[in-house]
Amino acid sequence: MYDLLIRDATVYGRGEHLDVAVSEGVIREVAPGIQAAARREIQASGQLVTPGFVDSHMHLDKVLVTGKSESKTLDEAIRNFTEYCRSLPEGSYQEDILTRARQVVRKAVQAGSTTLRTHVNIEASTGLSGIEALNVLREELKNHVDILITSLPNFFDGPEAQKKRLELVDYACRNHMIDFIGGAPHSHDNWAEITEQLFELAARHQMPLDLHVDESDAPHVDNFEQVADLTLKYGMEGRVSCGHVTALNAVDDDTAARVIAKAKKADLHIITLPSCNLYLMGRSDRQPIRRGVTRIREFLEAGVNISYASDNIRDPFRPLGNGDMLEEGLLTAQVAQMVVPSDLETVFRMGTVNPARGMGLSGYGTDPGCRADLVILDAPSVPEALLSQCDRVAVIKNGRVVAGNHTCSYNAF
């Protein structure tokens, strides 16, 4: 007796007309016409069964923030979010995060995500409150979605305050409050020093890094190159993620090729955030206005692991977004000009297999023995799923159906 049996599915990476048998949260068998009973059966009728989406770069502490001022640049967004935090009544910050983040996580799960990774600010005024709130939320929702946490310390207020912020990250590491050490060192004057300090912390605690890197229009990628060099220096190949890297589009092709080769050697994981960077980058450009998205094709051609993610959702940094990885995937395909069927297959991997690798997720996939973190898509193929933005018929976490949606529509002809 299985817990769940999906009948007559097109299973991602395996083939058509297959049954998927699940028990105790694990895929036990993938084969045609499995002769067994189950506590619950789902008739897929050729629908696509894939691993759940992995959204590897979010900001759940910022979602759904509406401030008094509109943000049209990255610097304005930072200021407006800081002002929002300061405007909250004393003692209400954690509950405010929980209320907003819970709404977005529900939407993300309903859209097919089974694993989320969120950056969480460490500010002078709030300390570790945001990280504490997200730890509460991940415990509350652990049976529905995995939430992994990256620290995002703010270093804008001088050396002494920077030291205190690093001490808070150290405390969070020692008390198992975070899964990745992060930061946006490129945005500070002493970026090289901060980057090295973050690597030292990661080495000390044997933790992976998940950094914002060169998120600007400036024609240099010095921080990205430093991250590659430090990854090799500290022996952290395969354990460092770099988000954004938008400045790579502002440098010449030879420089880009040289640094991308270093990224390959260091086995860096790149995360492109097209929807947010399209909104924030290139603001000072006259025509032609840059797209503000890193060199997706060049990374792919070099064999560098690259993923896409949702980033900011309806906050000062981006007033759009639904936490929907299929939606983000179609946008990524369009801006990268990757819309033929083979390219759409690649883009789909960038929202599933690639981020799972970048985050070190074990047991991810559709093979027997993998965790039963799956989504049933109302489409016969990956390209059609992206193009039609199909229903997520069932979202399955650890073998349990935790969400789903069905669109009701009709034509009068």
Image (cartoon, grey):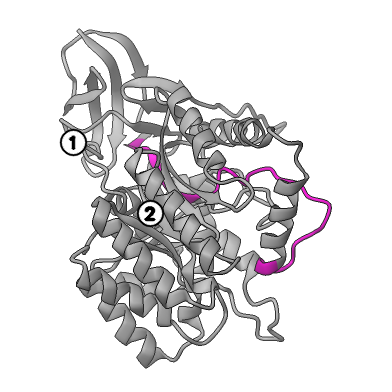
Which one is closest to the eye, mark 1 or mark 2?
2
**Front residue (pair 216, 160):** 160
Q: Which mark is residue 367?
A: 1
Amino acid type, residue under disc 2 in the picture: Ile
Residue occupying the point 49% across, 28% down: 136
- SS of the residue under disc 1: loop
In the drawing, does residue 96 fall left or right of residue 233? right
Q: Residue at x 35, y 70 (%)?
A: 196
Q: Is residue 124 above or below residue 148?
A: below
Give residue 339's position: percent from left, percent from top. 46, 63
Magenta residue span = 49-75
User: Is residue 108 positioned above or below 342 on the image?
Assistant: above
Q: Quadrant of residue 255?
A: bottom left
Residue 181 numbered mark, or none: 2
Q: Are marks 1 and 2 in contact (CB under 8 Å)?
A: no
| Mark 1, other Cα within 10 Å: few <14 / some 14–19 / many ≥20 | many
**Residue type beneath disc 1:** Asp
102 is within the stretch colored magenta:
no
- Labels in figure, total: 2
**Which is nearer the eye, 178 or 403?**
178
